[in-house]
Image (cartoon, grey):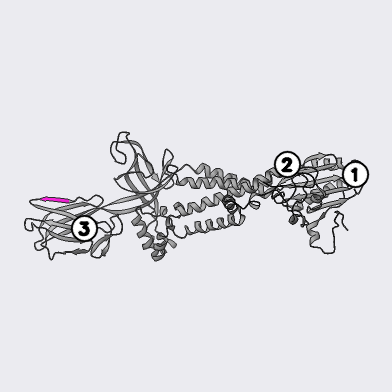
């Protein structure tokens, strides 16, 4: 690392603009400025000094303020795309096929594109997590790049400063005291202490400072954001975050997604409605009844240690509970919320094997739509074989029946019917209000006889170990915002030369009105020469500043 030697004899690292001992400008660019650049105390910033190796280039890229702002904008735009349509964890379907069909049915071609681009599960997608990670890296590198040099510079401030440093501050004064006194510096020191400044004195020089901690407000913000981003990224770690949906039919026992070893049984679903009729806007929306309460009475089971994982055998009851809206079942950090319901889902369909000409029945076939059998034996050489089952029949594609989902919304069947009269069997395709006989006209048919329905409850399973981390990150961020918004860093340098002349300079990172108010009180108390604001002078052509710091 090259060194820059100041006229005071102090060696400064390459890239330093203001000597870290006396404050004298070190570069031609800095010497050409009428007011010193005090943003980072003129200290050397790595990203503005080195640009040779690949590490330097990566560092400089992520430390750039423009890059950081660009990443924030890109993340905001990407996150907003996920709000155009509901995300997958908000819709009442489980399988990928059902999700695809849902977006297509509800939102048309736009929904199909939205789902195909992966925007329906945006916040869990790899590319979005990479964007968040890049933003986190940018925040960390930018904080290190500027925060550490700034801290070192503020920590090692000197009381006496070079004349070039003093006269190049925005607020300066230079001249004899308005009232001769041997106690001028004592008056200065005492008044600054009364104004709650931390005062350091060296011979006839005083440096007063307060609110230094406000310079770290932005970096406290960064720490809060980093903690928050870490919490978000931990959502991808298995076992840290679970946000799953499950549909549970009445009487059904299912493994709880994300909660290994636990099963949940839907004992009964209850829906209560208001007695009064819908009115106004509800009628316009086609609302027939208003739900007063809907709940699922469940039993939570835990699988025994010697049981086969994932199989509902050898279960031990843990607890029974009534899950209602905003009253979830909680256990070991998991929470199961009542989110949705479906009424009268098809459970069982009953068919009669009937002679088409005589209407005589050879027996009934009862098909469980969630677990159909391959074959149903009616006795006396009569049987029905289930050759195909399509829970949500959506039509034919190249002559082959298709199902949109695995939910029995519109069941269709291909039956092979064997009777003593037709030992070779007859094939029949049976759907709701649609029967086809591909091998020609049959002697027998499957005639719809009855249907059983049941209710289904939609539950949301959530588990989040990152909530404390997110809360801490949010609190730290707000502390940083408060520090940066309500406090400011003020510094005043006063030096009395051997001939009695007073040299004064002042700087603050913001709120110049506040520091000028302090200077007015100091000037009046210690009879100091009147200060000037050089930034105002730059905008006033009829006022000049002489090179030695005196005004005319």
Circle nearer the N terminus (2, 1) = 2
The quarter holding residue 549 reads: bottom right
156 in magenta: no
Q: Which residue is identified by label 2?
A: 156
Q: Which residue is identified by label 3?
A: 413
Q: CA distance from mark 1 to mark 3?
A: 107 Å
Q: CA distance from mark 3 to mark 2?
A: 84 Å
Residue 163, image x, y percentages? 82, 49
* Near-viewer residue (190 or 335): 190
Circle nearer the N terminus (1, 3) = 3
Task: State the mark number for residue 183.
Answer: none
* Near-viewer residue (252 or 202): 202
* Near-viewer residue (131 or 178): 131
Counting other residues with Cα less than 10 Å from the Cα at mark 2, is it few (<14), some (14-19), or many (20 or more)?
A: few
Residue 489, image x, y percentages? 72, 47
Residue 490, image x, y percentages? 75, 47
Residue at image location 36% in from the left, 46% down from the top: 296
Task: State the mark number for residue 498.
Answer: 1
Whether residue 278 sits left or right of residue 183 in the image: it is left
Q: Secondary structure at mark 2?
A: loop
Q: Secondary structure at mark 3?
A: strand
User: Of circles 3 and 2, which is in front?
Assistant: 2
Q: Which residues are magenta?
A: 375-380
Counting other residues with Cα less than 10 Å from the Cα at mark 3, is it few (<14), some (14-19), or many (20 or more)?
A: some
Residues under numbered marks 2 and 1 in contact, where contact means CB atoms less than 8 Å apart: no
The quarter holding residue 440 reads: bottom left
Residue at image location 84% in from the left, 51% down from the top: 173
376 in magenta: yes
């Amino acid at each position: 690392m090259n060194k820059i030697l100041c006229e005071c004899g102090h060696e400064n690292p390459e890239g330093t603009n203001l000597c870290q001992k006396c404050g004298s400008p070190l570069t031609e660019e800095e010497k050409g400025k009428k007011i010193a650049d005090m943003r980072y105390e003129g200290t050397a910033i790595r990203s503005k000094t080195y640009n040779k190796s690949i590490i330097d280039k990566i560092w400089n890229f992520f430390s750039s303020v423009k890059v950081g702002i660009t990443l924030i904008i890109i993340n905001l735009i990407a996150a907003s795309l996920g709000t155009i349509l509901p995300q997958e964890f908000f819709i009442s379907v489980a399988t990928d096929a059902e999700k695809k069909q849902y977006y297509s049915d509800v939102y048309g071609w736009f929904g199909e594109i939205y789902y195909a681009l992966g925007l329906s599960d945006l916040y869990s997608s790899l590319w979005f997590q990479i964007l968040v990670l890049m933003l986190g890296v940018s925040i960390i590198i930018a904080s290190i790049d500027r925060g550490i040099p700034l801290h070192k510079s503020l920590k090692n401030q000197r009381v006496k400063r070079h004349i070039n440093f003093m006269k190049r501050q925005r607020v300066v004064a230079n001249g004899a005291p308005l009232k001769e006194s041997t106690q001028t510096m004592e008056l200065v020191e005492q008044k600054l202490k009364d104004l709650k400044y931390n005062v350091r004195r060296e011979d006839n020089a005083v440096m007063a400072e307060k609110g230094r901690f406000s310079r770290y407000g932005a970096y406290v913000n960064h720490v809060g954001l980093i903690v928050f981003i870490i919490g978000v990224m931990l959502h991808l770690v298995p076992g840290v975050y679970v946000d799953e949906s499950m549909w549970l039919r009445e009487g059904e026992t299912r493994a709880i997604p994300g909660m290994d070893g636990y099963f949940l049984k839907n004992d009964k679903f209850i829906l209560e409605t208001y007695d009064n009729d819908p009115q106004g806007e509800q009628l316009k929306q086609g609302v027939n009844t208003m739900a007063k309460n809907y709940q699922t009475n469940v039993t939570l089971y835990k699988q025994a240690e010697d049981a086969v994982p994932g199989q509902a055998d050898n279960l031990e009851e843990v607890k029974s509970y009534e899950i209602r809206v905003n009253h979830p079942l909680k256990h070991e950090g998991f929470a199961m919320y009542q989110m949705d319901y479906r009424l009268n889902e098809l459970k069982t369909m009953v068919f009669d094997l009937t002679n088409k000409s005589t209407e005589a029945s050879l027996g009934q076939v009862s098909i469980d739509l969630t677990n159909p059998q391959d074959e149903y034996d009616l006795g006396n050489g009569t049987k029905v074989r289930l050759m195909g089952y399509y829970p949500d029949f959506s039509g034919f594609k190249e002559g082959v029946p298709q199902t949109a989902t695995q939910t029995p919304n519109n069941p269709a069947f291909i039956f092979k019917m064997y009777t003593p009269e037709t030992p070779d069997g007859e094939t029949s395709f049976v759907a709701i209000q649609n029967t086809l006989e591909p091998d020609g006209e049959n002697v027998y048919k499957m005639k719809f006889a009855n249907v059983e329905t049941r209710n289904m409850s939609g539950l949301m399973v959530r588990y989040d170990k990152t909530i404390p981390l997110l809360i801490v990150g949010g609190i730290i961020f707000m502390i940083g915002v408060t520090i940066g918004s309500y406090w400011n860093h003020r510094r005043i340098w006063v030096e009395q030369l051997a001939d009695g002349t007073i040299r004064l300079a002042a700087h603050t990172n913001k709120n110049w009105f506040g520091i000028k108010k302090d200077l007015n009180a100091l000037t009046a108390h210690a009879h100091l020469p009147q200060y000037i604001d050089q930034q105002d002078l730059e905008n006033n052509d009829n006022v000049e500043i002489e090179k030695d710091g005196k005004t005319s």
